[in-house]
Image: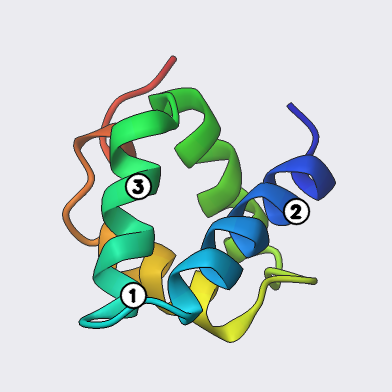
Amino acid sequence: MKHDKLVRMANDIAAFFASQPGDRAAGVADHIRSFWTPVMRRQMYQHMDNGGEGLAPLALEALLALRSKDPAEGAKT
């Protein structure tokens, strides 16, 4: 999947959770962990390594937190 589509999806998720109560970044991270494939997450992490252009601050915050705990980060596919 192209990075621009993943960025748009992550930003859409962040926009939804921005209006929700509680830990918004945790909500975004939980949604991505639950519904994105490991390949999609690895592609997003690669995009982040290349500067993360276009990512909303809440999306980036959530993805950074998720990455630190993501088993997909260690898997190679």
Measured in 3D between alpha carbons, the distance from the residue under mark 2 to the one under mark 1, in whole angstroms, is: 16 Å
Measured in 3D between alpha carbons, the distance from the residue under mark 3 to the one under mark 1, in whole angstroms, is: 10 Å
Please state which amino acid type lies under the numbered disc 2.
Arg
Residue at numbered disc 3: 31
Front residue of this view, candidates 13 and 42: 13
Q: Earlier in the sequence, mark 2 or mark 1?
A: 2
Please state which amino acid type lies under the numbered disc 1.
Ala
- Residue 63: x and y in percent read 42, 63
* In the rendered image, the vertical position of residue 4 relative to residue 27, given as above or below: above
- Residue 47: x and y in percent read 66, 55
Q: Residues within 10 Å of mark 3 (few under 14, many from 20)?
A: some
Front residue of this view, candidates 35 and 48: 35
Q: Earlier in the sequence, mark 2 or mark 3?
A: 2
Which picture quadrant has residue 67?
Answer: bottom left
Please state which amino acid type lies under the numbered disc 3.
His
Mark number displayed over residue 8: 2
- Residue 10: x and y in percent read 59, 55
Which picture quadrant has residue 35?
Answer: top left
- Secondary structure category for the residue under label 3: helix
Q: Residues within 10 Å of mark 1 (few under 14, many from 20)?
A: many
Task: Quadrant for the C terminus, please.
Answer: top left
Dots 2 and 3: beta carbons under 8 Å? no
Residue shown at 19% from the left, 36% from the top: 71
Q: Residues within 10 Å of mark 2 (few under 14, many from 20)?
A: some
Residue at numbered disc 1: 25
Q: How many marks?
A: 3
Q: Earlier in the sequence, mark 3 or mark 1?
A: 1
Front residue of this view, candidates 68 and 6: 6
Mark number displayed over residue 54: none
Residue shown at 79% from the left, 71% from the top: 54
Residue shown at 34% from the left, 75% from the top: 25
